[in-house]
Amino acid sequence: MTVTIVNESSISKDLKRFVGVRRVWINNSLKEYVYKKTLTKKDREDIIGTIKQYHSSSKGKDIPSDEMSKDIENSTRQEIEILHQNPKVKDFGFWEQYEITLRKYFLKIPLYNKRTNNGPKKEGYWKEDNMLSFIAKKRLKDEFIRQQKEKENDKITEPHFNEGFMEREKIKLLKEKNKFIQGRRSVRRKKSVSRYTRKMKEDPSPNNWKGRLIVYLPEDIENLWIKDNLPEVGDGNQSSDSCLSVPKMSGLKTIKVPYDWHKYIKLEDKEALGTWYNRKPMDSGDWAEDEDIEFNIENTLRTKGLINENGVPDLEHQSISEIFDGHALTPEEIKTIKSHIRTKYKNAIKVEKKKLDNSYDFSDDALDETKDTFLPEDKKAFDKIKEKEMKIFPDADLVKKIKYSLVKEKINNYMIDYMKKQRKLPKTALIFVWFDFTEIYQRYKNSKDIIKEFKILSKYSWSSCKIKIVLVNPAKQ
């Protein structure tokens, strides 16, 4: 049986690993096998031949299951498609699991694969419910985009998400029952609500209001609104608040999302969708802020297990990239948001380490009263140490605090800056050297070589300036 690689011309000559699918037909009956493969040096001598010859490793190296072996023998057609070429190692398993889950639960294609998660976390394998949610959210976003483009181009096909209308009494009921999903950091932005309210008072016709409530319909559509069989609202907090504050406003138009389209989407992903619905620009005139996107990312990191045992977040994971999808952000703006989140986690890790170390934080961020990272107790402790040394050196012209790893570099810079401003060298410079942890302080304090270097620096580097270096012990007494 001849096997065809449907996208053979696009296969990289530098292919090292890939996720592919083998399709097996028996007459009109199709079944698929999704797999990942890493190519050895020998495999790469004939990449196309290797791809065609590989079947499965269900029962051992290149040995498919009995079911697949039998179907291959009786097949009337076979083809292979390479789905992902040279993915990063940490995404390798992710994309295999993605393709299997997509086919099993959404495309309903019969598979030889029996499991949707059969690999290590380091290769990106997820819990099945997280992958289901990721795919469902992505498909829902794609469908919204498709319908919007068709609407803009006047090429309307049968929409999956129909428009409807929700009366103000039903909006009020859903508010009371906490059925509005809040995807943005601020539950209500006062300026937006005030602006919407003013516009609705001027024109209380729902037909002239461009914003739509995104409504997630329950499974039992026949008994909708009976007892607790209520829909959820994925976006429209501010519009609904404004509507309820204007008695003349009879309700709001809706976009109805059927149950099968959202049933797998977890709460944190529906919250992220709430931010995505408000990406710049939106017809409502309001949009998601950077802080809303950060809020969704932090939720995703925490709930999806994307923070490693050392407390470091994986901000390059596919689910994080997907949150940025569709937002009018430049690469630099995305980099800034990620950097801000990394700093938060880095600070949290440091705080935890400090607790275990039982030491003060004498860093610039911890002692700066203008920053969120300010620690009053630590500043008080440092000020006490500083006050004691200032009594010994009351005539110090230059007083600076320097991290242990930057002593030589910083002292020289400070001296040069002082000369530029004062046209002379300071007579006495008092330098406080601070350390991240007690263990580092002890290592420096007990190192004869380092102390010798400090003595040489203080005595000879700037001969007309007396430099006193104080090693500040961070340990709490």
Image (cartoon, rainbow, N blue to C red):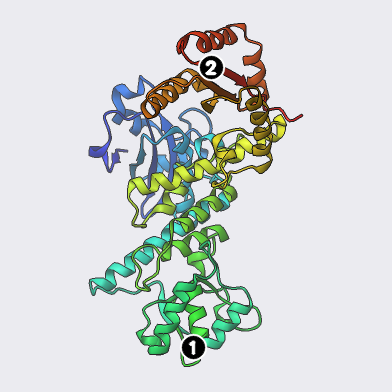
CA gap between label 2 and label 1 equals: 71 Å
Q: Residue at x 57, y 83 (%)?
A: 172
Can residue 317 be seen here? The reply is no
Disc number for residue 467: 2
Quadrant in the picture for the N terminus: top left
For label 1, the residue is 246
**Rendered position, 2 above or below 279:** above
Q: Position of residue 457 (x, y in %)?
A: 50, 11
Q: Amino acid at mark 2?
A: Ile
Q: Residue at x 69, y 40 (%)?
A: 377
Q: How many numbered marks appear?
A: 2
First in sequence: mark 2 vs mark 1: 1
Quadrant in the picture for the C terminus: top right
- Left or right? Give the position of 366 relative to 77: right
- Left or right? Give the position of 330 relative to 133: left
Extreme front residue here? 395
Q: Position of residue 388 (x, y in %)?
A: 68, 27
Disc number for residue 315: none
Q: Amino acid at mark 1?
A: Val
Q: Neighbour class for label 1 at 10 Å: few (<14), some, many (≥20)?
A: some
Q: Neighbour class for label 2 at 10 Å: few (<14), some, many (≥20)?
A: many
**Mark in front: 2 vs 1:** 2
